[in-house]
Amino acid sequence: MAGHVLVTGGTGYIGSHTVVLLVEAGYRVTIVDSLCNSSAGALSRIAAITGKPDAVTFVQLDLRDRAGVTALFAATPFDGVIHFAALKAVGESRAKPLLYYDNNLGGTLVLLQAMADAGCKTLVFSSSCTVYGDGVPPLSEDSPTGLTTNAYASSKLITEQMLADVCRCDPTWRVCILRYFNPVGAHPSGLIGEDPRGVPNCLMPYVLQVLVGRLEKLTVFGKDYATRDGTAIRDYIHVVDVARGHLDALAWMRKQLEAAKAAGGATGLLEYFNFGTGTGSTVLELVAALEKASGKKVPMVIGPARAGDVPAAYANIEKVRRASAAPLTHSGELTHTHTTVFCRRAACWAGARSTPSTTARGTHGTGRAKTRAGTRCR
Ligand code: UD1
């Protein structure tokens, strides 16, 4: 048995993909999620993909509910925690910074206290490349962090600092901080994917909604950047690769622990890993790949640059590559995903969701969209 993992935010986009892989790998999973930005429908989809409905327990809970979180840890001896649960809309975080600090930091604080009290000190934290602010790419884990421009980004950075302080004062904690670049795509089953409530802020879900006719056209935010075609560059990584990286991080930490015990050394660790492909794509390149994958044209106009956007952000993934020999991730797993492959999957998923067959809620769904269960997106 691989162990019992608590996954906060496990019904969300990256969380649901990670839960699928955990269950497939033999883990028992407890999901805690407030459902404030996701749907319980993800649970039946996870069960449909894995065929193991009993492997997952769901608890609807806001992490700020101290009594509830404490009771959860008292009832179950978890082997580790993967912490996704957080609000993540940058624009909303600019308008409501205190909501973001309260939810993202308050929830994490309660979680860490409950973990410490229960003696469960193994954590994988879902962070973001946004902590690098306006850094110069390729961004390595040693690149300076800071200069964040919104409360969402600041909440990720402050959580990272909180975790560093916790590890400094108690060297028995084992913490992996994963800084995602731009996760995109959908599970090959076509059953789970990204489906934000309302009009999407991020490029990929926005273009997908244009492709399926929910939105009229894409506005490209700026064409005067000093890049190869004038549009901004990002490092788009397939969500299944990101999800797999969490399992690899758990396995890597276990291996480090065994090695430290055998050597009689310190068992604690705090490590940071970039989760990107190491290759940047421009907005126009991503759109072209989606058009090729879907066989449809994406209507678009050029608009002004979005405030706060950086011209280019892509990862240096040498550290994760080195760790992969350990292995943190399967050889080549983080780099083999080419734009066309994940775009085909994402476009297929969006197409499947607009097929008028059985109605089902998406991972983040509002209940409007429909999907044809079992559509394979390879
Ligand atoms: C997003 C998040 C950021 C997170 C990062 C990595 C937002 C607003 N930002 O930023 O917090 O840390 O991913 O996970 O959610 N674009 C358009 N038209 C659109 C939408 C986007 O041209 O309608 C462009 C953007 O200007 C940008 C690129 O597409 O150049 C990607 O945008 P987006 O998907 O929002 O990602 P990030 O800007 O990297």
Image (cartoon, rainbow, N blue to C red):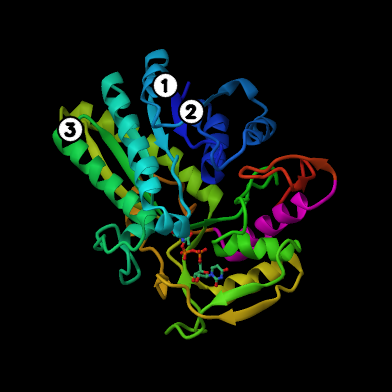
Front residue of 258 and 316 = 316
Residue 167 shown left or right of residue 282 in the figure:
left
Q: Residue furthest top?
A: 75
State whether the magenta stretch is mostly helix, strand or loop: helix
- Residue type, label 3: Pro
Give the residue pinned by disc 2. Answer: 61
Question: Percent from the top left, x then y, of residue 330?
Answer: 46, 47
Q: What is the quadrant of residue 261 in the picture?
A: top left
Q: Are marks 2 and 1 in contact (CB under 8 Å)?
A: yes
Q: Picture coordinates of residue 200 (x, y %)?
A: 59, 59
161 relative to 356 in the view: left or right: left
From this view, report whether residue 208 is shown above or below residue 365. below
Mark 1 lies on a secondary structure that is helix
| Residue at image location 18% in from the left, 40% down from the top | 165
Residue 27 seen anywhere in this rendered image of the structure = no
354 inside magenta stretch: yes
Name the kind of residue labelled 2 in the image.
Leu
Q: Mark 3, mark 2: which one is toward the viewer?
A: 2
Give the Cα distance between marks 3 and 2: 29 Å
What residue type is disc 1 on? Gly
Callout in the foreground (1, 3): 1
Q: Quadrant of residue 367?
A: top right
Q: Tell me whether the residue at label 3 lies in contact with that at label 2, contact meaning CB atoms closer than 8 angstroms.
A: no
In the image, is residue 93 above or below residue 169? Answer: below
| Mark 1 CB within 8 Å of ligand 1 | no
Residue at mark 1 = 68
Secondary element type, mark 2: loop
Q: Which residue is mark 3?
A: 171
